[in-house]
Image (tube, grey):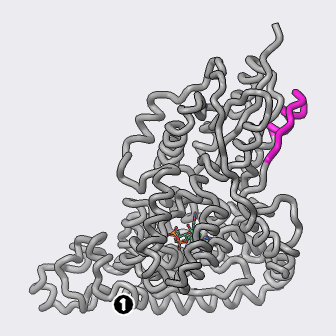
Amino acid sequence: MDKPSINIVWIKRDIRTIDHEAFHVAESMELPYIPIYIFDSELIKHPDTSDRHLQFIFDSIIDINSKLSEFNKEVEMFYGSSFKIFEDLLSQFKIENIYSYQESGIKSSWEIDLKIKSLCKDKSINWTEFQRDGIIRGIKNRKNWNKNWHIFMHGEIINNSFDKQEKIDFKNNFTLPASFLTKINKNKNKFQPAGETMAWKYLISFSKERVKNYAYNISKPEKSRMSCSRISPYISWGNLNIRLVYQHLLELKKKKKNLRSINAIISRLHWHCHFIQKFEVDCTYETEFINKGFETLKRDKKPKYIKAWENGLTGYPLVDASIRAVKETGWINFRMRAMLVSFFVHNLDQDWRNGVYFLAKQFLDYEPGIHYTQFQMQAGTTGVNTIRIYNPIKNSKEHDSEGIFIKKWVPELKNIPVEFIHEPWLMSEMESKFYKFKIGIDYPNKIIDLDMTSKKAKSKIWGHLKNKKVKEEKKRILKTHVNQR
Ligand SMILES: Cc1cc2nc3c(=O)[nH]c(=O)nc-3n(C[C@H](O)[C@H](O)[C@H](O)COP(=O)(O)OP(=O)(O)OC[C@H]3O[C@@H](n4cnc5c(N)ncnc54)[C@H](O)[C@@H]3O)c2cc1C
């Protein structure tokens, strides 16, 4: 008997039902289709992935399934090798088309896609991959990139509609193992809630109320938790896309209020695609220097330092509070992220590659295209961006002057007066006794000297900018990644 013909909608980082081109095209076809999501066993093992990501994905799918069920549809979840899963589906069906979004993922996900591409070729399957946000596949430079970004963002939003279909009967031979579900759901409710429904709640609460303080609090570790949009995980896993947010903010602009904040967040939507575009062009930035001239820059590998940084025990209160906050909640603001990288690479003198996966795993909004390129930019290894060494004491005094954020995440310091919160080592013996707080016992002494290491780091990194290879690479990077009007 002939196998029934079907189409597939392969969901990746686009777990939503609004402005979804793959769903839209599949719905317009005669053939029935199955929407699928694959928890690829190889990708799950990759050192960038953590349970909080997987739980966010799982809950996002449950959320859209609650909407799709009305139309007799649901995203079928699979666990295992993507290749074997497609082979298995092919043993049950004649797959005519696969519809998905282009994924600007890590090298391993690209390699998986290549295997599926060759399978498609063998079996005469058409795989259509739609453009994700403003990121364009196959370009060699940024000529007209800005213009195209704006055209895409002003494009019509797809008003997805779903028709009721006969449910397609088939056997899922790669269901999610119970142990996997137990593992990823262990910390359920600890992090920002996932899914398209919550994404809109966050976006609307931002535009109604929280936006007014956006631009003023963006650098403050505590206040930004409320005044930043906090939509990043929803964008990263595709519960929202950039176009939906962009057009929502343009509508908001018409009210002529909070314009500074609205313009600031709109420019960040542009940055979002700008960074991912770099990674789309070259995904080796996950493991290799953006500017190859930095390969020869020596770092001092000290596992003791790496552990102290990861555990929030460096003795620098703002660094420790930021690490502990992101481990516990999955989010910190941009400035604290940049400061953590700067401290790790410049002050602790560690290779960026020994910290990059650790933070990827903590960020609920982990997006490879932004993460590796931003990490390297903060580590000063692009050779084209201004190098900034963030001073955690100065940042602490300026952005957490009362130590509210620090006291929340470093409770060891909660009873010491504000004058010592940024530099607890300054306490005299008398004061130490008075506040029953001993540096080195109740809280670690600073593991490095900030002034000395900053000075050393400056001469090291600025000195290296003179390297011949760094200069050559600079030209290539500017040509490839800098927007040309
Ligand atoms: C080392 C490092 C790693 C980072 N890793 C990630 C990551 O994995 N995923 C991620 O989404 N962001 C990352 N960022 C960028 C930024 O910190 C977050 O996007 C932002 O803090 C998310 O909070 P929000 O949604 O409230 O942002 P808002 O300030 O409200 O901005 C709205 C959206 O704009 C985009 N955006 C904001 N800032 C930036 C930026 N600097 N670069 C690119 N896009 C931006 C995000 O999609 C964000 O959701 C990283 C920054 C650094 C320094």
At horizontal 73% and vertical 37% (from top left) the residue drawn is 27
User: Which residues lie in the magenta part?
Assistant: 115-129
Q: Is residue 28 left or right of residue 125?
A: left
Q: Is residue 120 magenta?
A: yes
Query: In this orientation, which residue lies closer to the viewer: 300 or 287?
Result: 287
- Residue 91 in sight in this render: yes
The answer to whether 418 is drawn above or below residue 473 in the figure is below
At horizontal 84% and vertical 81% (from top left) the residue drawn is 485
Quadrant of ligand 1: it is bottom right
- Quadrant in which the N terminus is drawn: top right
At horizontal 63% and vertical 22% (from top left) the residue drawn is 167
Give neighbour class at mark 1: few <14, some 14-19, many 20+ (Cα, 10 Å). some
Amino acid carrying mark 1 in the image: Lys
The residue that label 1 is drawn on is 397
Badge 1 element: helix
Residue 400: x and y in percent read 35, 84
